[in-house]
Every structure is written in C-alpha cells, then in structure tokens.
C-alpha cells in the first residue's frame, strides 16, 4: 500500500517518527491504525452497554466482590 501525503502531513509524520522512537513511517501508521481499531472496539462496547437493559444498582458490596474475584480471594 502506498499513501500520498501533502508535504505538511509528510513533515508531521517524519517529526513523529523521529521524536517518538518509531523506526519508519510505516510503523507509525500501523500504530495509529491499531489505536483506531481499539477506539472503535471500545465505542462498540459502550454503545452495546448503553442499549442493554438496566441491571441492579452497583454498590460498594458489588465492588468488594469484584475486587475479591480479581485477586483470587472470593469472599466467604
């Protein structure tokens, strides 16, 4: 794939490559695409959640149980 950029955008990409530790402009573009994919996936999850039916209210007990599950120490 070849991408043509106006000089101003090419200069910006070159600055990002040099200043942010990328090896090539292709590496920089790949990173931008991966980040965009992640943002789109998150947006989809948020929209799915917004369209879903409400659940029980979340309270401190819910977070305590969740925290215990996350550290492998289920409350007894």
Image: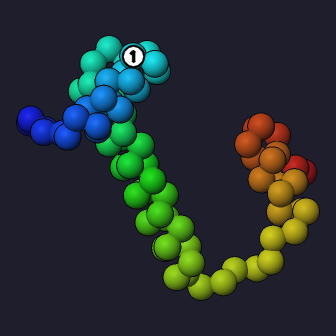
Residue positioned 29% across, 38% down in the render? 9
Position in image of residue 73 (x %, y %) = 82, 40
| In the foreground, 76 or 19 | 19
* Side of 21 where 57 appears, left or right: right
| In the foreground, 56 or 36 | 36
Circle 1 packing at 10 Å, graded few (<14), some (14-19), many (20+), is few
Tell me how the rendering is colored: rainbow
Q: Is residue 27 visible?
A: no
Residue positioned 35% across, 32% down in the render? 12
Position in image of residue 53 (x %, y %) = 59, 85
Q: Which residue is mark 1?
A: 18
Position in image of residue 18 (x %, y %) = 39, 16
* Side of 47 where 5 appears, left or right: left
Q: Quadrant of residue 28?
A: top left
Position in image of residue 56 (x %, y %) = 76, 79
Residue positioned 44% across, 66% down in the render? 44
Q: Is residue 10 visible?
A: yes
Is disc 1 placed on a helix, strand or loop? helix
Q: Residue lying at the far left in this picture: please name it.
A: 1
* Side of 67 where 6 appears, left or right: left
Q: Quadrant of residue 2?
A: top left
């Amino acid at each position: 794939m070849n991408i043509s950029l106006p000089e101003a955008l090419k200069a910006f990409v070159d600055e990002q490559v040099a200043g942010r530790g990328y090896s090539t402009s292709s590496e920089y573009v790949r990173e931008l695409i991966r980040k965009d994919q992640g943002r789109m996936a998150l947006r989809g999850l948020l929209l799915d959640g917004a369209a879903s039916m409400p659940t029980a209210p979340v309270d401190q007990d819910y977070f305590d149980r969740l925290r215990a599950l996350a550290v492998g120490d289920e409350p007894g």
